[in-house]
Amino acid sequence: MSEIGLAPSLDDIARIAEIAFESLPPEFRRLTGEVIFRVDDFAEQTVLDDLEIEDPFDLTGLYQGVDLAARGGLGPAAEPSRVFLYRRPILDEWAAHGEITLEELVAHVLVHEIGHHFGLSDAAMHAIEASAGDGA
């Protein structure tokens, strides 16, 4: 982590995300394929505008690309899929929710965005998380 008293850097968050990804089941990682992971402080303004998000702290992560369910076998190759993690909103959420570790939050955001890569909606992922939380 960063020096004492300093917030975790972009590199720190990237290392946490890398460790979180490597701790996922091998089959999940294999199915993820060649997704590019990137950590930025905030989403670009054009992204926020496209998503109609006014406060950049409201977006902790983003999946950009064609999800696996929507890809066809023919036609031009799709652009590489990308998962963005946004450091400042993640740190803000972490500070607001003291009951979880930064590592848990980064892993949560990472897995959520990878879920979009698999074609899952936010509603579907929330239902999966709720059933997992209930021990189902």
Image (tube, rainbow, N blue to C red):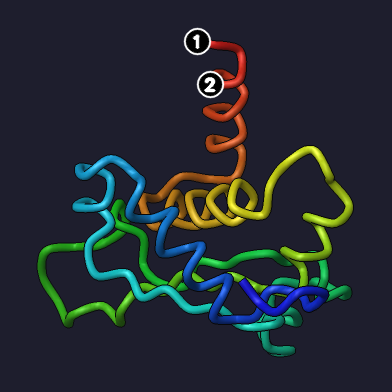
Residue located 36% across and 50% down the image: 118
Q: Position of residue 33 (x, y in %)?
A: 22, 62
- The residue beneath circle 1 is 136
Instruction: Examine the rendered structure and indicate whether residue 60 appears above or below residue 124.
Output: below
Residue located 78% across and 72% down the image: 52
Residue type of the residue flagged with mark 2? Ala
Instruction: Answer left or right for 36 relative to 48.
Output: left
Q: Position of residue 29 (x, y in %)?
A: 26, 52
Q: Quadrant of the N terminus?
A: bottom right
Asked where in the image residue 99 lies, by quadrant, the reply is: top right
Q: Residue 67 carries which label?
A: none
Along the viewing direction, whichever of 113 and 39 lies nearer the viewer: 39
Along the viewing direction, whichever of 2 and 91 lies nearer the viewer: 2
- Dot 2 crowding, Cα within 10 Å, few <14, some 14–19, many 20+: few
Asked where in the image residue 82 lies, by quadrant, the reply is: bottom left
Residue located 71% across and 72% down the image: 51
Question: What kind of element bears circle 1?
Answer: loop
Tag 1–tag 2 contact (CB < 8 Å): yes
Instruction: Examine the rendered structure and indicate whether residue 136 appears above or below residue 121.
Output: above
Question: What kind of element bears circle 2?
Answer: helix
Instruction: Examine the rendered structure and indicate whether residue 44 appears above or below residue 127.
Output: below
- The residue beneath circle 2 is 132
Q: Where is residue 4 in the image (x, y as percent from the top left)?
A: 76, 74
* Whole-number angstrom distance, CA of label 1 to CA of label 2: 5 Å
How many numbered discs?
2
Residue type of the residue flagged with mark 1? Ala
Residue located 65% across and 80% down the image: 9
